[in-house]
Amino acid sequence: MARLASDHLGMDLLIVADRRDPVATLLAAEAKRHDRRMVAMEHEEAGRLFSIAGEAQETRILPDLPMLIRPTAPPIPNRDSDAAFLAGESMATLWTAATLARSPVLNRPSHRGFEAGWSSSGAITERRAGTDMAPEIYARAQTDAGPPDRRPWAVEDMRGRTRRWVGADTGNAPYRARPVIEDEAYERVIVLEGQAWRCTTLSLDGFDLEARSIAIAGNLGLGFVAVTWGLDPKLEQARLARIDPYPRVDQIIPVWEDLGPALIAALSC
């Protein structure tokens, strides 16, 4: 019955994304190359697509079809109360459908939300990921503060922009800060359902970044994720620098030749 429902809608693969998301455009081209009938919908529209049938033995999602969940678009300002209520109901339906669907879902939501175990706090995310948890400073009101000690630190503003923190120059709060490696460079690993690809060809076998990144993604409940590692100039140490639950197009392009077909395969029933 679920298969008939999706066939009637003319799709066998759904990507839920902002219409301006370039990853959706990239995946649509890959799906066409593999003769998949992919449809892209924004989150509210996708939520209105589904019906949820609660029965004695199971909960059924109609249509039940493979999905890739991408980040939501910015909220629409100045909505009236009725429109805001309907939007919330649609998002709740999408959350439930993506969580309970039997078909493959990347990234499948959890009871915590659409990003599963990921949090905007790096320390909380690291704890849930089962890795070493580095210190994190969060300032809600204090402006233009300086680093707490002589270690190298980086500070991140509300827009996610990160830079070195060397003096009393944080600017306006809120912001968060974490220690880093002096003069560190970065390696990024793209993880997809137990597979992983590094974005450079540096010889880094001693760090086992692919396996570590796969373990992190699994602990967070994320099937498709970008994991960034900070490396010291001598390539003697590595630290977990960042986890992106929604990989950006610039992050995945270096490995797209392998990743594109793997995404289509992962979204196959």
Image (spheres, rainbow, N blue to C red):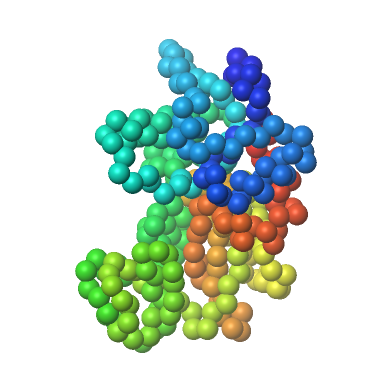
Query: Where residue 22 appears, x then y in whole percent?
Result: 60, 51
Judge whether 94 appears above or below 162 on screen: above
Direction from residue 7 to residue 132 in the image, left or right: left
- Kindly indicate the quadrant of the structure image that contains residue 65: top right
- Residue farthest toward the top in the current orientation of the protein: 56
Query: Where residue 154 appears, x then y in whole percent?
Result: 41, 76
Residue at the image position 59 percent from the left and 83 percent from the top? 233
**Which sits in the foreground, 13 or 188?**
13
Instruction: Locate the N terminus and report the quarter of the image it occupies.
Output: top right
Judge whether 106 appears above or below 125 on screen: above
| Camera sees residue 9 | yes
Instruction: Locate the C terminus and report the quarter of the image it occupies.
Output: top right
Residue at the image position 32 percent from the left and 68 percent from the top? 175
Residue at the image position 71 percent from the left and 44 percent from the top? 29
Query: Where residue 145 appears, x then y in whole percent?
Result: 27, 80
| Camera sees residue 127 | no
**Which sits in the foreground, 197 or 146?**
146
Residue at the image position 48 percent from the left and 47 percent from the top? 71
Query: Where residue 90 appears, x then y in whole percent?
Result: 41, 31
Judge whether 143 appears above or below 103 on screen: below
How many numbered circles does the render carry? Answer: 0
